[in-house]
Each structure stands twice: as C-alpha cells, then as structure tokens.
Amino acid sequence: MSFERPWLLALGILGAIVVTMLFQRAERARDAQSLEYSSLQFFAQAVRPRTWPVAALRLAFVAALACFAFALGGARLSLPMPVRDGTVFICIDTSGSMASTDVQPTRAQAAQEAARAFVAETVRGTRVGIIAFATSAEVVLAPSADRDAVRAALDALPSPNGATAIGDALQLAERGLPATGHRVVVLVTDGVNNAGVDPQQVAAELGALHVPIYTIGIGTPSGDIIGGTQATIDEAALQAYARVSGGAYAHVEDARALRDALARLGRVTSFARQPVDGTTGFLALGAVLVVVTLLAGLARGSVP
Amino acid sequence: MTLREALLRGRRRPRRFGAGSPTSYRGDGYEFVELRAYVPGDDVRRIDWAATARAGDLQTRVVLEDVALTLAAVLDDSPSMRVGRARALIDAAREACETWFAAASAGDRCLRVAPDHASPPYAPVTAAFDLRRSLQTARAALPRGCALLVASDWFALHDDDDALLVSLARAFDCTALVARDPWYDGLPLQGIVRLRGADGGSLRAYIGRRERAAFAAAVRERDAKTHAMLQRCGWRTGTLREEDGTAALAGTFGLHAIEARRG
C-alpha cells in the first residue's frame, strides 16, 4: 500500500489517537457513574459475561478511524484485478515421451484435459493460443478469445512423436504475443530440451518483456521407457525458465494434479496486480463500520 | 414477646446451649411467658389455680428465669455491604445491630466484635473488616453462653469455615443475618453494561438473557448454600433485606415485631 498524501495520513492518525483518547476519557467518566455491585469476582464467576461484543465494537470503531485516516492519506493499493484482455500461450509438449502411461490415460491426453480446465478458469475475454512442440514447434491456434476454437485446437493436437524443442516453442510464443498488455506463457512438458534453440535464452528474453513462464513438469520419477530411452524431466531447467521470467514451476505426477495445477494457473494468469485508488473504498468502509458500530452498539445498549 | 425473651427461650430449646448465664442475686424470676397444660414434673408452685378453674385442667404458668445476658454482634462493614438498590445493606445491618443491643436489659452486657478486639457497641472500630478474623476474635474474647449476632453478606465464607462455625455454635447462641443480594430479584441490566466492584475494579461486558438467568440462579444458589451451611453448623439464620434491619431480626426469631427495650 502506498499513500499519495503521507502528511495527511500522519494527521489522520494523530486525529484518530486524539479521538480514541477522548473516548477513553469519556468512558472512564461513565465508569465512575456505572452500577456498583458487591463482588465483581462473584459476578464474573456466576455470569461468565461475554466480553467479545465489547471488544468487537471497539475494534470496529478503531478500524473505522484507521479507514478514515487511510482515505485522508490517499491510499493506493496493489490488488489482483481480473484482466479481460490478457493473452496466454499454452505450449504443450507432443514429443514421443508424452505417450507414456504413467499418467493415466497418457501424459498427452492428461495434458489436453488439463488445458481444457485451464481455459474454463480464465476470465472471459482472455485470448488463449495453443502451441504444440516436438522436434519442432507449431502454432495450433493463434491467440483467440473464442473458447470453442481453443477447445477444437486442443482436440487437434498432433499425436506424441519426436524430440523436445522447448526453446522453439517459447520463441514462437514470444513472436505470437502482442507487444503490450497482460501476457503469460504456460509450458507443459515431460522431458529435456534436445532440439532447437536454447530455451534458457528465450526465457530470459520473455522475462525482459515482463512475460512470465509458468512451467509444469509431468511424469513420475520412475518415468517410462519410450523408444528405448527413459522419459525423464529436467526439473532444474524448468525451474530456471520460470525463475528467469518471473513465473513459477510445478511438478505433477498424475492427471488430477495436472488438471488442478492448470485450473489454478487459469485463475492466476487471469488476474494481475494493479494499483487501485483506495480513497473511496476506505471512506466507504469507514462509514459502513461507523454505522454498523453505532447500530450494533445501540441495539446492545451502549454506544462504544 | 421481646427479643430478649426470645433469646432466653432459646436457652431452653433442646440441643441449644442457650444464651446468658444465671445470676446468683435475682432468684428464679417471675416474668410471665405463657400458660400451658400441666405436665408431670412441673413445679406445683407454678400451677395457676385461677386458670385451672377456668380451663378445667391443671395449667402451669411458665416464667422466665432471671439471667444476665451477654449480647455480642459482628457487623460486616466491608465495601460489599455498602451497595444496595434504595439504600446500602450496611444501613440495614446497623439497624439490626442497634435493635440487638437495644434488647439488653439492666445487668446485661453488650459487645461489638471487631477483627482484632471486642469492645462496647459504640466504640470506634478502625480495623478493616475481616469475617474470619472477627469470628476467631469472638470465639476467643466472648464469654461462654453469650448471644452472638453476625450481620454480613457472607461473601467471605468458605466451605472449610464450618469447623469455626461449629465451634462458635457450641460456645454461643449464634444468629446469622445473611444480607440478601440487592439484585436477588433480577439483574437490572441488559445489553453492554459497565459494572463497578464495591471492592474496586470495573467490568464492561454484554449481558443478555443467558447471563441474566445465570446470575439469578447463582445468587439464589449462593443464598441457599449460605443459609444451609450456617444452619448445619448450629446457627439460627435470617435474611437481612436492605429495607428494614429490625424486621429482618424479628423475622429470624419468629417475632412479628420487636419491642425494643433499652436496659
């Protein structure tokens, strides 16, 4: 949170402290006129009076004062706001190892299902593009806000075959993304880059353009033998792509986890932290808290 | 019947040690109490022949022995007795003590028991009130057989005090006035309330229906428990209401009104 008028915030806090002190003084005066009972100890033991409503009202009152002080100081908040015109490229590995069945039914089909879940979670208006990569990479669908087109593109993914050109896929995504706006790349793979350009370099370029790469590694540690070679994941490399671009890495070992991870990403990539003017919000919240405190206090027999 | 007579009658009740000690210079006594049917063993000199003639059966005149009483009182003047709805409980307690001492006749002795000593009724008391210490002082300082009145809210009474109460009841004719909680009939509070303790401190809390019911139950339970404990220990008990201390004392002895007789 930042403040446009910090000196007014300081003044507001000072005012809140003065109001609180005056309130406490008035409360002490009211205490002196309050009802007297023989033994408070007996009363407390017998009744077990509820003190939380008093504490809640006091807290609400203090919170209202704080809200007014923040509004006075021109508070600006950095909040995750839904991005309606974002662009996301999903790069799906279609190399031979994706035919592995350690993730049911196959890694490729699980990735397709998970990508559908991702699309379902994105905010309407988000443009989603699909890139399939094996020995080379190809754009299956240019970024589109049409959900049906995205689903159709996912159905049209090529069968698992060939090497793994992660760098080529990232490069295609970099070229296909708009120059500005909220842009994200999601990379789903189960292998090691063994063809095309250096993905680390492309990831750094995307990072420089403020395009985060969210990488998801699929597969069990034992993996599967595909074409006479063990299908393994280069987790360190995937983590590095995510780190250098400002994204995140997740490793999944089954279809459900993959689906959950992509669905979560669908929500994450649809929101971006944006500075928001909090003056009106804090003012409204403070007013609501004051009204609620007064009404609740009156209903309970005392204005805090 | 006067309070003094009631105390003297109390002497004759079985299992009560009784108040007062016989004097050697006033004889058998002639203060009339009642007429009742003759029972074998009654002194034939006490047969009222006129009443016998009227009733057709032998009637015995019951008279009081002439004795010198020692009337002692413990007056709880702790902060918790200074509360009340219309007036402080301590005022009613003082009233009861004044009536108690006013019951003394010539030759009787009156003492007020403070935590550290027993002194004449109107001598100033400087020590802060302490129920347990006052009762211990009473046990040590008062003559055996005296009539002891304790007017207190008994907040300081604990379950392990029964030995002290029993020892007092064995030595004296003990009467306890238990101050009724000013809010016995209901807590006059609802919602968020502020309370001050008589002995200091304050409380701010929410009082709802549940709290009111819990308070009513607790107050009644404490009152009943205090009376039961004192009675179990051999004390005569009564309820001290803030409205009238004299009436409270009269009620304790089953009297409609007390005819105060200054000695």
Image: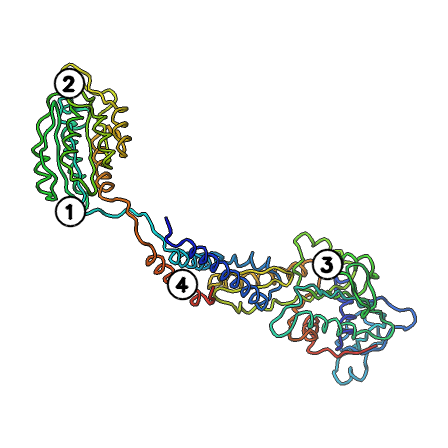
Q: Quadrant of residue B177?
A: bottom right
Q: Which residue is mark 1?
A: A125
Amino acid at circle 3: Asp
Q: Which residue is mark 3?
A: B130
State the image coordinates of residue A171 (x, y, percent, origin top left).
Answer: 16, 30
Instruction: For marks 3 and 4, give the one nearer the viewer.
Output: 4
Find out whether the residues at labels 1 and 4 contact each other: C-beta distance under 8 Å.
Answer: no
Callout 2 crowding tier (Cα within 10 Å): few <14, some 14–19, many ≥20? few
Q: Please tell me whether mark 1 sits on a helix, a strand or a loop.
A: loop
C-alpha distance separating marks 2 and 4: 67 Å
- First in residue order: circle 2 vs circle 1: 1
Tag 1 and tag 3 share a subunit: no
Observer able to see residue A105: no
**Circle count:** 4
Left/right placement of residue B233 relative to residue A9 reads: right
C-alpha distance separating marks 1 and 4: 39 Å
Amino acid at circle 2: Ile
Tag 2 and tag 1 share a subunit: yes
Q: Which mark is residue A290?
A: 4
Residue drawn at the location 16% of the way across and 47% of the way down: A124
**Residue in front for this viewpoint, A293 or B123:** A293
C-alpha distance separating marks 1 and 3: 81 Å
